[in-house]
Structure formats: C-alpha cells, structure tokens
C-alpha cells in the first residue's frame, strides 16, 4: 500500500515511486500528484489531487444519521425517476399518462412519431424505456427496503406527484429522460463522500454505475457522444483533470435538490 504522506516527505521514497511509475508509462501522471495546484471545487482537498464535495447539507431530507439521510436523498430521486419513466413509457406507447406500470411491459409498442431518429434508433430507444422503467422502480424499492431494515422511515413520494414537459415524439421524450439520468449520475457521485458504511457505498456505486450506463445508451440512441460531458453547475473530482472525458462530473445534494424542483407537481 502506498503511503502518500511518506512519498511527499521522503525524497528517496518519492524518487523510487516515480521511477516505477515512469517504467509503467505513468511518469507524467505520477509527477502531477506532487505538483501543488489548488482545487477549484468547493470542499476539502486530499493531497491537492482530489476534490471532495462538502456534503454536510441535505436540505429537507430526513434521517437520524448521515447514512440514512443519504439513502433518503437517493430514494427521493429514484422515486422521481421511476415515475417519470412510467410516464414516458405510457406516452411512447400511446397510453394514458396516469396508467400504473405493470410488472410486464413486453406488450407495449411504440405508438408515437420517432422525431426523426434514424433506424434502428427508435426501436432501441423504446426498448430502453421499457427496460429502464423497471430498473428505476427496482432501485426505488430496494432503497426503501434498505432504510426500513435500518429501522428508519423512508421518504414517501411527492404529495402532488411529478410532472415533466414531455414532447409528443420519441426523440423529445428521450431527451428529457436523458436529463433525468444525468442528474442521477451527478447526484450519486456528489453524495458518495457522505456515506460512512462501506456496504452502503458498494450499493450506491452499483446504482451509480447503472445510472451512468443508462445515460450513455440513451445518448447513443440520440446519436450523441456517450462520454462524460460537462454541464452548467458541474464540479470535477480532481483539479488535475487533463481532458473533458477523463472523469465523471458531480453536483452537491443542494444543487441536485434545487434542479429537480421543476419536476414536482
């Protein structure tokens, strides 16, 4: 295990480390670890190479402990995502938007204009709506059960429900769903540092990974670059980031909760 404090203070150890990294073709990157550059995002600095968000504030999110607040924060977002996917799938299938999501949506078929998406993208996009609607519902149900297993009280759905400016064609629906997915990606990464239970961290990382995959395939369906791309308000995990695609971006819980306000009916 590398002790970075020792590497920073002991020249011989640092020289040995840099030699090994150079042999592996990582000399420039390793050297950058010891170059003093201030972090740009608000929060704490770790060896001047990692910027961790200051996640002490989850406004309006209940919980007896920080871990429980993080889970209720995640549940708030997953409940929103699950309902918006339900609405999107109903609209794309020509059903009433209030129709509950059945366990089996294999009988749903695309029943609206594609919005100009070239083949085979429309059918792929509709298939993703079918699959991901069930996934988001599974995330919601799992997190709710996890909070209950801890003896906590899960947050409920927004009393007024959820609303979104869906368009009338598949392309516009997928574009809105992409915004929701990208919000989820940033939310999980931004809140990860507040989790103190390693098992919860593993679960959160698993859901974060799934949200990232969702965003990427929806981007591909919309014929967009699936790589991480910076959006307004984004923070980066390291001030040493060389390129836009090197790392995923995050936002703080306060930013996320503010950004989803327009979806609350």
Image: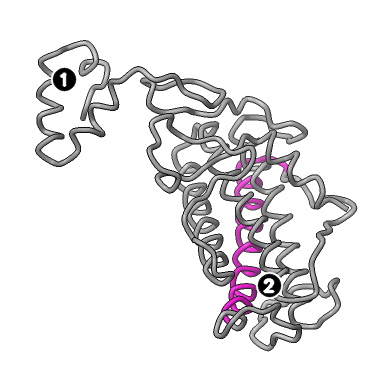
Residue 54 left/right relative to 263: left
- Residue 20 locus on image (x, y percent): 11, 33
Q: What is the secondary structure assignment of the residue under circle 2?
A: helix
Is residue 15 one of those drawn in magenta? no
Where residue 18 appears, as percent x and y from the top left, is 15, 27
Mark 2 burial class by Cα count in 10 Å: few <14, some 14-19, many 20+: many
Against 65, residue 243 (above or below) is below
Boundaries of the magenta span: 124-153
Where does the image place residue 224, in percent across and percent down from the top left?
54, 64
Q: Is residue 104 above or below residue 230?
A: below
Task: Give the crowd class for mark 1: few <14, some 14-19, many >=20 residues within 10 Å.
Answer: some
Rendering quarter of residue 25? top left
Residue shown at 75% from the left, 47% from the top: 260
Q: How is the structure coloured here?
A: one colour
Give the residue at mark 2: 171
Query: Label 1: which residue?
Result: 14
List x then y, in percent, for residue 217.
Answer: 52, 67
Q: Quadrant of the N terminus?
A: top left
State which mark lies toward you, 1 or 2.
Answer: 2
Foreground residue among 169 and 237? 169
Gap between marks 1 and 2, in whole Å?
A: 53 Å
Looking at marks 1 and 2 on the same chain, the residue that comes earlier in the sequence is marked by: 1
Q: What residue lies at 73% left-to-right and 43% top-to-bottom?
A: 259
Q: Nearer the viewer, residue 9 or 58?
A: 9
Residue at left offset 51%, top offset 58%: 210
Q: Are marks 1 and 2 in contact (CB under 8 Å)?
A: no
Q: Is residue 206 above or below residue 33?
A: below
Number of numbered labels in the structure image? 2
Which residue is painted at 60% across and 45% down in the image? 231
Q: Is residue 252 left or right of residue 258?
A: left
Q: Residue furthest top?
A: 9
- Chief SS of the magenta region: helix
């Amino acid at each position: 295990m590398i002790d970075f404090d020792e590497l920073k203070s002991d020249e011989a150890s640092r020289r040995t480390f840099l030699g090994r990294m150079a042999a592996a073709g990582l000399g420039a990157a390793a050297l950058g670890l010891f170059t003093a550059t201030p972090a740009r995002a608000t929060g704490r600095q770790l060896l001047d190479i990692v910027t961790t968000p200051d996640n002490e504030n989850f406004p309006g999110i209940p919980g007896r402990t920080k871990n429980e607040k993080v889970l209720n924060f995640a549940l708030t977002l997953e409940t929103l995502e699950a309902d918006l996917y339900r609405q999107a799938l109903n609209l794309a299938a020509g059903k009433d938007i209030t129709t509950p999501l059945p366990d089996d949506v294999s009988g749903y078929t695309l029943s609206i204009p594609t919005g100009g998406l070239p083949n085979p993208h429309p059918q792929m996009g509709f298939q993703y709506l079918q699959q991901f609607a069930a996934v988001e519902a599974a995330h919601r149900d799992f997190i709710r059960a996890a909070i209950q297993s801890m003896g906590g009280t899960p947050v409920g759905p927004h009393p007024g429900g959820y609303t979104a400016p869906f368009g009338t064609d598949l392309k516009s629906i997928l574009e809105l769903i992409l915004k929701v997915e990208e919000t989820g990606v940033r939310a999980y990464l931004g809140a990860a540092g507040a989790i103190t239970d390693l098992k919860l961290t593993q679960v959160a990382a698993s859901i974060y990974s799934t949200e990232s995959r969702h965003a990427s395939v929806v981007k591909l369906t919309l014929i967009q670059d699936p790589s991480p791309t910076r959006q307004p308000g984004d923070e980066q995990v390291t001030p040493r980031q060389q390129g836009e695609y090197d790392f995923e971006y995050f936002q703080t819980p306060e930013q996320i909760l503010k950004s989803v306000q327009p979806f609350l009916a």
